[in-house]
Image (tube, coloured by chain):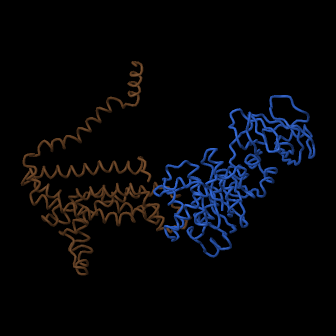
Chain colours: A brown, B blue
Amino acid sequence: MNQLRSTRKRSVGLRRPPVAIIAIAAIAIAFFMLPFIGLLWRVPWSDAWSLFTTTSSLTALRLSLETSLWATGLSILFGVPLAWVLARFGFPGRRIVRALCLLSLVLPPVVGGVALFAAYGRRGLLGDSLFELFGVRLPFSTAGVVLAQTFIAMPFLVLTVEAALRGLDQRAEDAARTLGASRWYAFRRVTLPAIRPALIAGAVLAWARALGEFGATITFAGNFPGRTQTMPLSVYLALESNPGQALVLSVVMIAISFGVLLSLRDQWLGGSTTPRTSR
Amino acid sequence: MSIDARFSVQHDEFELTIDLSLADGEVLAVLGPNGSGKSTLLNAIAGLQPIDNGAISIDGNVVDDVGHSTFVLPEHRHVGVVFQNSELFDNLSVLENVAFGLRARGTKRTVARATATGWLERFSLEQFAQRRPKSLSGGQAQRVALARALASAPSVLLLDEPTSALDVRAKAEIRRDLLRLRREHPVTTLLVTHDPVDAFALADRVIVLEEGRIVQSGALDEVASHPQSRHIADMVGLSLVRGDVRDGALVTATGARLVVPADAAFGPSVASIRPTAVSLHRSQPEGSARNMWEMTVSDLDRQPERVRARLAGPIPLLAELTPAGAEALSLDIGDSVWAAVKASDVSVTPDLGPSQPAPTNCPIR
């Protein structure tokens, strides 16, 4: 018995990282956890509910959910074909096109907002024609918020889906083709189901990113309550006037993001390792 | 239902040059080592690999002709392909996999499913209909892949190393199914393999590919007795002996006994013997070999680096000697010699071949 216990202890020690590494990792964990603990500690819990249910908070929350879902939908609609082309279609300058499409991943969002302004703003490249042809003014509108969020969030989906498409064994598609499937049919019934976990993960990532979008939104769409003032914007503004509300809204956003991350993990596992239930 | 292919295509380091034709209902095996261009050949016929020169026609219809810029997409070629790793669709049930080809070509769901069920029953796979492909064994998956390829009634069947990823028992199962298919429902078939046993079991004719060139073609017996290169000699020429294993020996239909390794499983089996494992002697040898027969040399193939002798006797064998060894025996056609094989040089696999009756729940059409 003793023998057994000591061997087990020893085998655990075999796989364990060095103590110094564990110590440094513990510091990193604390670095990430402390801000959230601090936040929870500072939240005026007694007033939390009333601060959260103020009209301005709820309006911002609803606007955030609406715009981020729209942005996610647009990201899927345009991002999946884009990822497909980038992964499968060799054309000259593909690397440059790819880099341009993913640029907003690394760009400061404010710069993204300025660039959007230069394209769709009143004096922008397309701003005038959009207004004259369709009567659409994107800047400082809810549609502008969606545009800014899509601009920032779509690359997350494209990156995830493209990686999945690249990693996919194309023999299954070949098999579908020899069985009489057109390219489109093979994509719909073989490729798409195969990349479904990545597509869901990418969509969730894009949605979370859109929900948290701040820089591009405030630059391009401004800060109009009810129209363009999303959660992150209202947190930032509340910080000056009503720190308690800012803290409560921050906790709400953290709860949403944390939930998303946890569900994402399950989704990844659900798509790859856990056996599907057979009917 | 024939194939005519005369084409060339760049393949890695070399150019694959092909000139072959298959008659209606014929089974042709393409033998060759890995990287010899076998799969490229198959992909070109299936339309998954564009060719650089030449033309391919299936059933008299030109499907690929570089000179006339004709290229028929794979989905319009009506070929059935079984890939090395099955390539079943994981998101669909086994039944939906088999029905896929019919659905893709617009057959109604109920009709497609009924046809698919028929094919599953034919291969005794109906109990797996609602399972996911991931839950199948390699052999089962490969048989489902075969049913899937056949369900949409292809003009020709292309088999790409259908047994190479399988264990011995599963190999035997898929060979049995292919043999039964040949009997009941002959389809023009191109079988790509590096396993001569597949070719022996199934093919009418073989071609041997080496570095993109057809180096030999003909009936398998012919190729085995007169291999044109060391490589072909190594690849083909196994002597296969069918029989029943009991009490440590395989007993053939004619009553001949072949002593096999002690761990061989009982029951119907196929024993294979490499030609180099057969030693020849002028008089009855004394030694440890457990298998000895007096045989007659029926054919002799003399090459600078080896001599192959076909031996007629209780168990027909192919033997390979060095030229010096043949010289010392002064071997000639019609001579009587003693052949010896050690039991440890005999490898045995279970035989699920045509001699075994089909399961009763499997309708024969």
**What is the x, y in percent for residue A273?**
42, 47
**What is the x, y in percent for residue B217?**
76, 58
For the point 24% across and 69% down, the residue is A118
Quick check: A39 left or right of B139?
A: left
Quick check: B23 left or right of B157?
A: right
For the point 32% across and 61% down, the residue is A154
Within the image, what quadrant is residue A221 found in? bottom left
Q: What is the quadrant of the C terminus of chain A in the image?
A: bottom left
**What is the x, y in percent for residue A278?**
44, 52
Above/below status of B266 relative to A223: above
**What is the x, y in percent for residue A123?**
21, 74
For the point 57% across and 54% down, the residue is B125
Foreground of the two, A110 or A55: A55
Q: What is the quadrant of the N terminus of chain A in the image?
A: top left
Within the image, what quadrant is residue B14 found in? bottom right
Quick check: B134 left or right of A106?
A: right
